Amino acid sequence: MKKILHSFFLRAFILAFATGFMHCNKVNDFIRDLPDCEVRQFNYSLIENFAPYLYKKVYDQSGKIVEQIDFTFLAVGVPALKHFLVRHSQKKLLFVDMDNPMDTVMIVQFNAFMRPETIITGGPLFNLQIKFLYKNNRLDSIRLSDPFGAYKCEYDDNGNILAIKQFSLGHGQYVGTFYQYDYSRRFKAQVYHDEAVGQVDFPFVILKYLDLFPELNPKNVRIKSRVGLEVGPHISDFILFNHMVDADGKMISYEVGTPTDPSVAQVNLEWKCNRAKDNHSR
């Protein structure tokens, strides 16, 4: 068990740097499909002693293109806040570390349908390529170039993501992240980042912060997030409750607890919408 859990966090705590700076100008061929509304800042009280928020996006003057993202991760030993410039160029996103602007940290290549296809990071001690595969226009699996293998996405009949998981031969069951929902409730828009990251690497999580996988945002209200073996030992086991929405039906806050501690964290979401009247924050 220690070996499989260790493999979770070995990947999660590596942010590698590419070998050279790739200069490019911001171009008009905007890669992301512009959502009606998106979370511009995600506040998580569990990490407030280490970082002011989980992530925050900075936009250009049009308010449409993300030029910068400041972020950390929900993980054991919360990493220091990072600041990445986001550059758009020829079906690619380039992430440049503002603290070392001569380095392109990460390159994301998009497929013909403008979905993320690969992530490439690199460095003298570590090099990782992540490949995303799709089915019915939603994320189906995540394949890594390292020995940890591929993860499969599982959805329910309503389109909610149920699991991002990998089968462990050693345990005879799946290991990964597992979610549960209240099927009596639906919100217009909701975003969650409660899992202890490590199962699919930090680069994937950064793309989730940018809402490049909208199919991972559920339709029904999420009430549980678990990381570890599907049955048995786990890294985190969170219960989500007291969800609050604004007048437009967007979730703006919820609380996080565990089976033994009902009050672990408060989460607040600040939204940015194309229509000014839909912009709400807490």
Image (cartoon, rainbow, N blue to C red):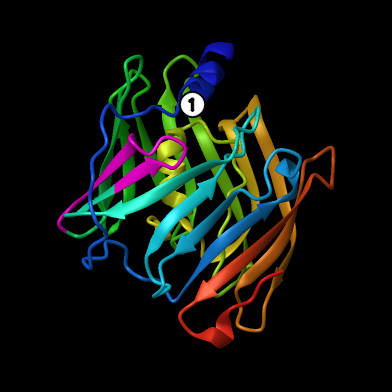
Where's residue 268, x and y in %?
69, 61
Where's residue 226, x and y in %?
62, 39
Residue 90 quadrant: bottom left
Label 1 sits on what residue type? Gln
- Judging by the rendered image, the residue that carries numbered circle 1 is 173
Q: Nearer the viewer, residue 71 or 111?
A: 71
Residue 8 included in the magenta stretch of the image: no
Q: Nearer the viewer, residue 36 or 157?
A: 36
Question: Is 218 rendered above or below residue 196?
Answer: below
Q: Nearer the viewer, residue 226 or 74?
A: 74
Q: Secondary structure at mark 1?
A: strand
Mark 1 is surrounded, within 10 Å at the Cα level, by few (under 14), some (14 to 19) or many (20 or more) other residues, namely some
Q: Is residue 14 visible?
A: yes
Q: Residue at x 56, y 20 (%)?
A: 5
Q: Residue at x 31, y 63 (%)?
A: 32
What stretch of residues is rendered in magenta?
94-112
Name the quadrant of the C terminus: bottom right
Left or right of 226 on screen, residue 68? left
